[in-house]
């Protein structure tokens, strides 16, 4: 189970390289043909500030790369990393390898908030920001769920999962009602719920990058405490972990990152469930090792999935549908294997 | 004053409106082995939770080393007091060695790696409990008794002046039960450690403890040396069973035998 430090560094380096390579290759793919060398040239010109390097190039190329493709690509990459990171934290706190960033109903809250905003926009176009409402919905849900599951200042994993399920069910009913109200224009809500990275801006990139970075730093700071917390609250307390406080901090952190991701991209399932699960097989359960590799793997996987739907498939399939279609069966396979292994062992 | 580890004055704790502990007044001395016995559900584990700081007393004063327990951070207290809980559970698949290393958590700074002396403690504890030979095995593959020994080794690796055991031998066969009690007893005799152990088996309690605390319905019922409190009357009062206590020449200690509900 224990991976040597040398192998771990190699793996982390490899994943970092893979993610960067995926960003560059993905930037080259799309309706307009752009070569990888042009991509590198455009990127270098922008990073180093030497705009004169771009003279002689088709003027559409820097525009398409910098203003159309890169914001979308980087948003997908960051959201993938953010969801995987939240998945690690949720699984660690809930002591459940089947927990994911949406276990606490954050996605339902975001979906409800977004649906309200979309409905208002149908009546009075452009009056409210959908991502903002999605974020508020997610955060409000989180606090309701936390409030519901706190007894005597303590939160237990089971009450959290149950509270998440209950609140999620109520919100789903609310979303159905909003869809009913939207009547013939219900497709706007449905498409938002399926998730998309289409026409993201640098503003989105900035917000998600800040959320993921802060979230990662906080989670990493509490990484060893999170390891100890797998022994349960009583033992973790006796080993010097402020379990109740750490649990709250990490839950709020992971949920905030999820809320930002969902607000920007809609609901994208399975990344936050499968990536941490899979990476735990490779690097073991130590969260300090698991977090970085999961972030890069999630980033690379979601970017590849988005690139497939954007540039490979003849028509764009909503990214949330694609991840569920690929991730679902894949997860079934891992799940069965685990069952078989644990029954034999 | 310095030889007192814990001092409790009128300590109480309730689960909601159900009182679990009431009016606990006790002084626990340094370098002694305390046994806590009493019927199921009388608040023994809750008592240990208060001592280890994972629950806060809601009445009375609970002082450890001259300061209220509530004034300690979890980390400060974890350098002083270790707990072997009754039930072991783990969410993810760590190796035995990694679990024992978790005992060093309060001693290792946040971003530091375990030092040579941390590893030394880990290995010594595994040797003391005899689990070194399966240190690389996955904790999830172990039997209940093996897991329990790992947890005891983890608590030993924590290397604290005070050790709390909550039925540490409940899953163990007689050989390993004796091994654990012998190891812990040596810590008291050779290193002046204080041990407070919930023990169901009164014969183990009589054999290993210096003092016995009998609890009943959330209160201290009797407290004293084995000679003072291990007798038929108190056992009858606390557990409601008929017994006979006599000096056993083989084990050279008081031993209890019971009236079994079977005709002979």
Image (spheres, coloured by chain):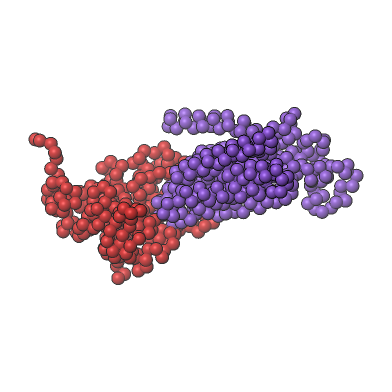
Chain colours: A purple, B red
Q: Residue at x 16, y 59 (%)?
A: B228
User: Residue A278 occupies which quadrant of the picture?
Assistant: top right
Please identify the quadrant where the C terminus of chain B is shown. Answer: top left
**Does A95 sit above or below residue A224?**
above
Q: Is residue B99 visible?
A: no
Q: Residue at x 33, y 41 (%)?
A: B145
Q: Residue B144, percent across and down?
A: 35, 40
Front residue (pair A259, A281):
A259
Residue B209: image x %, image y %?
23, 55
The N terminus of chain B is located in which quarter?
A: bottom left
Tell which of A61 and B207 is nearer to you.
A61
In the displayed structure, does residue B52 sit left or right of residue A31? left
- The one of B59 and A33 positioned closer to us in this rendering: B59
Q: Is residue B64 visible?
A: yes
x, y (%) of residue A178? 61, 39
Which residue is pictured at 15% across the width and 50% down the height?
Answer: B236
């Amino acid at each position: 189970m224990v991976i040597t430090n040398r192998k771990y560094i190699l793996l982390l380096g490899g994943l970092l390289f893979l993610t960067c390579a995926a960003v560059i290759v993905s930037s080259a793919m799309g309706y307009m043909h752009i070569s990888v060398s042009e991509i590198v040239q455009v990127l270098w010109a922008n990073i180093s500030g030497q705009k004169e390097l771009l003279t002689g190039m088709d003027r559409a190329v820097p525009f398409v790369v910098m203003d159309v493709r890169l914001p979308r690509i980087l948003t997908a990459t960051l959201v993938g990393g953010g969801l995987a990171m939240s998945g690690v934290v949720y699984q660690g706190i809930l002591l459940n390898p089947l927990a994911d960033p949406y276990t606490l109903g954050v996605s339902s809250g975001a979906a409800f908030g977004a649906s309200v905003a979309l409905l208002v926009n149908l009546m009075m176009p452009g009056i409210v920001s959908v991502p903002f409402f999605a974020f508020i919905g997610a955060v409000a849900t989180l606090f309701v769920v936390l409030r519901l599951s706190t007894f005597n200042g303590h939160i237990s994993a089971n009450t959290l999962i149950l509270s998440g399920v209950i609140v999620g069910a109520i919100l789903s009913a609310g979303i159905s009602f909003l869809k009913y109200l939207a009547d013939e224009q219900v497709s706007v809500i449905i498409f938002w719920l399926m998730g998309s990275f289409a026409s993201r801006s640098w503003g989105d990139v900035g917000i998600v990058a800040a959320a993921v970075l802060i979230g990662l730093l906080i989670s990493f700071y509490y990484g060893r405490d999170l390891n100890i917390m797998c022994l349960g609250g009583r033992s973790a307390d006796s080993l010097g972990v402020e379990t109740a406080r750490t649990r709250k901090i990490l839950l709020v952190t992971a949920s905030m990152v999820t809320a930002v991701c969902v607000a920007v991209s809609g609901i994208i399932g399975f990344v936050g469930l499968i990536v941490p699960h899979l990476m735990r097989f490779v690097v073991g359960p130590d969260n300090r090792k698991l977090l970085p590799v999961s972030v890069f793997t999630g980033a690379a996987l979601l970017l590849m999935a988005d690139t497939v739907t954007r540039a490979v498939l003849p028509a764009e399939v909503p990214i949330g549908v694609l991840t569920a279609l690929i991730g679902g069966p894949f997860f079934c396979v891992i799940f069965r294997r685990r069952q078989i292994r644990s029954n034999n062992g | 004053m310095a030889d007192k580890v814990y001092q409790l004055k009128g300590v109480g704790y309730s689960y909601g409106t159900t009182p679990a502990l009431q009016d606990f007044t006790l002084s626990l001395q340094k370098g002694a082995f305390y046994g806590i016995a009493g019927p199921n559900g009388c608040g023994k584990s809750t008592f240990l939770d208060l001592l280890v700081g994972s629950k806060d007393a809601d009445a009375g004063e609970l002082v450890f080393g001259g300061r209220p327990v509530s004034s300690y951070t979890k980390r400060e207290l974890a350098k002083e007091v270790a707990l072997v809980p009754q039930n072991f559970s783990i969410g993810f698949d760590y190796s035995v060695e990694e679990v024992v290393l978790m005992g060093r958590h309060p001693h290792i700074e946040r971003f530091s790696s375990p030092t040579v002396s941390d590893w030394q403690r880990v290995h010594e504890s595994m040797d003391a409990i005899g689990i070194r030979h399966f240190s690389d095995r996955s904790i999830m593959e172990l039997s209940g008794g093996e897991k329990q020994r790992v947890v005891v080794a983890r608590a030993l690796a924590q290397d604290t002046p005070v050790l709390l055991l909550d039925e540490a031998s409940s899953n163990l066969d007689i050989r390993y039960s004796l091994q654990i009690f012998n190891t812990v007893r040596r810590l008291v005799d050779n290193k002046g450690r204080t041990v407070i152990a919930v023990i169901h088996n009164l014969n183990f309690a009589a054999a290993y403890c210096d003092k016995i605390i009998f609890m009943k319905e959330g209160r201290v019922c009797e407290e004293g040396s084995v000679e003072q409190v291990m007798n038929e009357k108190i056992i009858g009062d606390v557990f409601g069973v008929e017994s006979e206590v006599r000096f056993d020449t083989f084990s050279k200690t008081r031993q209890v035998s019971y009236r079994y509900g079977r005709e002979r």
